[in-house]
Image (tube, rainbow, N blue to C red):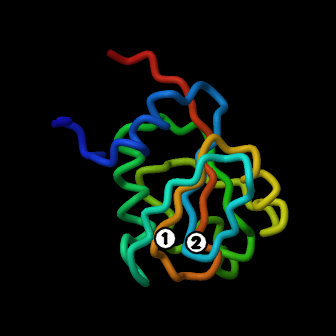
Amino acid sequence: MKRTHLLHAELSQVIAAMGHGDMLVIGDAGLPIPDGPRRIDLAVARGVPRLDDVLAAVLSELTVESAVVACEALPADQDRPAWYPTALPMVPLAVSHEEFKQRSAKARAIVRTGECTPYANILLIAGVSFEI
């Protein structure tokens, strides 16, 4: 059995295969998933699993260079959504929801959660870690 936080075999395999600049989307239950990216459906029921729980597990294994969110998810006068993880120090790039969906089509995989918060979707761009 794995010793790290992330136990989901398929999701862990996708992260292990990612290279610099590859994209992984973690989305709410309503995010449309186009043909092309691998679909990893974790949604069990409304709110299960929550987006922040899946993000925490993913961030335990993925080095992230940058992130993208929909500007519709941003509260007034703030540069991060309320659900944005503190583990990501960078300010996300905010794009329209339509552009977010277009970028998502180029992701390696899209992870569907049970999150039911509108626009609770994040595109993670893999970075490089040379730490041992």
Seen in the picture, residue 75 relative to 100 is either above or below; the reply is below
Direction from residue 112 to residue 8 in the image, left or right: left
**Whole-percent x and y of residue 16?**
44, 29
Q: Which residue is mark 2?
A: 120
Q: Which residue of the protein is positioned furthest toward the front in this rendering?
A: 35
Q: Quadrant of the C terminus?
A: top left
**Whole-percent x and y of residue 93?**
72, 54
Q: Are marks 1 and 2 in contact (CB under 8 Å)?
A: yes
**Whole-percent x and y of residue 9?**
34, 42
| Residue type highlighted by circle 2 | Ala
Circle nearer the N terminus (1, 2): 1
* Residue 101, numbered label: none
Neighbor class of circle 1 (other Cα within 10 Å; few <14, some 14-19, many 20+) is: some
Q: Quadrant of the N terminus?
A: top left
Residue ID at (76%, 51%): 105
Direction from residue 75 to residue 114 in the image, left or right: left
Kindly report which numbered mark, 1 or 2, lies closer to the viewer in this rendering.
2
Direction from residue 113 to residue 7 in the image, left or right: left
* Residue 83, numbered label: 1
Neighbor class of circle 2 (other Cα within 10 Å; few <14, some 14-19, many 20+) is: many
Direction from residue 125 to residue 83 in the image, left or right: left
Of 1 and 59, nearer the camera is: 1
Residue ID at (66%, 75%): 73
| Residue type highlighted by circle 1 | Trp
Residue ID at (83%, 67%): 98
Of 87 and 70, nearer the camera is: 70
Of 109 and 68, nearer the camera is: 109
Residue ID at (64%, 75%): 119
